[in-house]
Image (tube, rainbow, N blue to C red):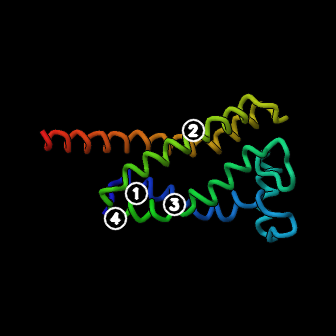
Amino acid sequence: MPSRLDAMFAAYFATHIPITLLVDVVPLLPEHAIPRPLRALNAFLTGAVGDPFMVVGPQPGLVWFRSLLAAELALQLPFFFYAVWALWTACPRRHLPLLVYGTHVATTMVPILASLLFGSIGRSAAERARLAAMYLPYLLIPVSMAVVSYGRCARALAARRSKAD
C-alpha cells in the first residue's frame, strides 16, 4: 500500500494519461483528424475557458508550446505508466526518476504561467487568473514531487556514503 503522498502522485500521473491523450494531443493533430468529441472539448477549453495555447490549427507564435506538447506525448506519456506503477508498488528506485520529471515539468511550467499572467494573450485579469489557476497544479505537484524526491535521494546517498566509511 503506497503512502498518502505516493498515492497522490500516482493519481496525478494516472489522471494525466487521459488528459495527454484526449486534450493535450489535439493541437498537434491536423484539423481533419480530430474526432468530433475531442474537437468539442477543445472548443470548450479555447472558447469558454479561454485557453490561448490549445487552439487548433497553425499557430506560428506557439511553436514553443506545441514543442512542449510533443515532448509530453513522446517522452512523458510513457513515463506516466512507469510512475503509476512505481508509486503504487513503492518501488525503491522511484525517487530519482520522479526528481528528474518534477524538475523538468516545473521548469516548463514557468514560461507557460508567465505567458498566461504577463504575456500578450488578449485576456482580462480575471481570465488570466482563471487560466493560471487551471495550469497551477501542473507546477505545484511536480515541484512538491521534486522536493520530496530530492530529499529521499539525498538521504539514500548519505546512507550509502556512511556505509562506505
Q: Which residue is mark 4?
A: 89
Q: Does residue 82 appear anywhere in the picture?
A: yes
Image quadrant in which the C terminus is located: top left
Q: Position of residue 14 (x, y in %)?
A: 51, 62
Q: Position of residue 92 (x, y in %)?
A: 30, 57
Q: CA distance from mark 1 to mark 3?
A: 14 Å
Q: Which residue is mark 3?
A: 80
Task: Give the left or right position of residue 155, taking residue 72 as reference.
Answer: left
Classify 10 Å Cα crowding around label 2: few (below 14), some (14-19), many (20 and above).
some
Q: Which residue ends up furthest to the top in the rendered image?
A: 118
- Image quarter of residue 105: top right
Classify 10 Å Cα crowding around label 1: few (below 14), some (14-19), many (20 and above).
some
Q: Amino acid at mark 3?
A: Phe
Q: Residue at x 48, y 40 (%)?
A: 143
Q: CA distance from mark 3 to mark 4?
A: 14 Å
Q: Contact (CB < 8 A) between labels 3 and 4?
A: no
Q: Which residue is mark 2?
A: 107
Return the disc, 3 or 4, that comes first in the chain's sequence. 3
Q: Which residue is mark 1?
A: 7
Q: CA distance from mark 3 to mark 2?
A: 18 Å
Q: Which residue ends up furthest to the front in the rendered image?
A: 164
Q: CA distance from mark 2 to mark 4?
A: 28 Å
- Frontmost of labels 1 and 2 is 2
Q: Amino acid at mark 2?
A: Thr
Return the disc, 2 or 4, that comes first in the chain's sequence. 4
Task: Give the left or right position of residue 93, taking residue 121 as reference.
Answer: left
Task: Give the left or right position of residue 59, taking residue 91 as reference.
Answer: right
Pick the front one: 3 or 115 = 115
